[in-house]
Amino acid sequence: MIVSSRKEDHIRLAAEQQDQPASYRGFDDIEILHHALAGIDRAQVDTSVTVGPWTWRAPFYVTGMTGGTETAMTINRALARATAATGIPMASGSIGIALDYPETSPSFTVIREENPDGIVLANIGAGRSLDDAKRVVDLLSADGLQLHLNSVQETVMPEGSRDFSAWLGLVEQIASGLDVPIIVKEVGFGLSAKTLTELKNAGVTIADVAGSGGTDFAKIENDRRSGGHDDYSYLNGFGSSAVQCLLDARLGHHVGPNADPNFTVLASGGVRHPLDVVKSVAMGARAVGVAGTFLKVALSEGADAMTEVLEIWMERVGQLQAMMGAATPGALEYTDILVRGRSREFADLRGLD
Ligand code: FNR
């Protein structure tokens, strides 16, 4: 297998970022107003959610990370075993590398081998053709495709693309031409309400805002550069947090009381624990993607620990719902939340109540 030093760098630097958390996390701006008598019986709580054609057991999934190297294969094997054991959906990292270097395919196909019956999503970058999208879905016998928009990352990458002009048209072709659902996502810089509207108009029905505050790909790519004058560190921390994106999505009626029931918004970026999941769902996300927090477990502790973590998260989400009186994740939308700090300022600037 060709060892891509870029993919190895991503894993190493993303894992390091877990030990140096982002200086700003939007989730810390969200406070849930506690109602001491609101609680219900945990046994009456259902944590499952509907996302496109699927029912997910809990309102979270393992979002796209890796593939292409030996380390990536080890991580994918651990994540696939854990998601198979728990029924949590999982996406692969970008399979573009396997189209260019087929010898790297086993680091991706290991996911389907380890999880033959679960919900597995393939992943590819915008800019790829419908034909490429079909090939990566076929490679994993995937149930769906994550299509990532990463113009900030590409800009900072020395070998990155500088032409993003065809992306929306290609997204449209893939949305209409693929026979499995697509989830369009960012990679940690967020999707604005304007972008969500453009995606919806292009025929996309599921989008994951993938905001800032967790894994920072501008910082990762900067750390891979030689430094000196050849640097883009001013882009570190760029983008909108998941919380800001969800506030913006409310403004654009993509979530909340006036939202289109045929368009589903997922959130990710800096989710560290089950309370962040609950906060996101309370803000209108149907479910939440987790990358860096789970990467650390899969990489350093393996499949059994990862399985335990997923089980704990499922149980704790249910417990938090019981504590808040939400029999279903959807009922969390009626939880009183207070928005503070930078997120409050963002809401004020965007004209939200
Ligand atoms: C990623 N992410 C990512 N996203 C994607 O769509 N395709 C990819 O190939 C990758 N690769 C990747 C590698 C590693 C090591 C990490 C940690 C992440 C981005 C990921 O899906 C997510 O959008 C961001 O990481 C934000 O979530 P977290 O990490 O803050 O939970």
Image (cartoon, grey):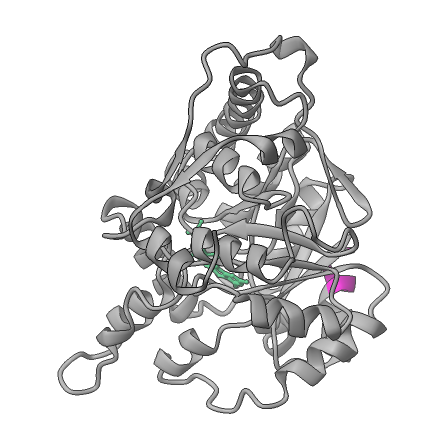
Magenta-span inclusion, residue 71: no
Front position in the image: 42 or 289? 42
Which quadrant would residue 199 be assigned to in this image? Answer: bottom right
Front position in the image: 20 or 236? 236
Q: Name the residue rendered at 66%, 17% in the picture.
A: 45
Q: Is residue 309 visible?
A: yes
Q: Is residue 66 above or below residue 115?
A: below
- Residue 106 placement, left or right of 56: left
Q: Is residue 185 above or below residue 331?
A: below
Whole-percent x and y of residue 145?
70, 61
Whole-percent x and y of residue 59?
62, 36
- Residue 127 placement, left or right of 233: right
* SS majority, magenta: helix
Which quadrant would residue 345 be assigned to in this image? Answer: bottom left
Whole-percent x and y of residue 314?
57, 26
Q: Is residue 320 above or below residue 121?
A: above
Magenta-tinted stretch: 137-141
Front position in the image: 317 or 27? 27
Q: Name the residue rendered at 66%, 26% in the picture.
A: 47
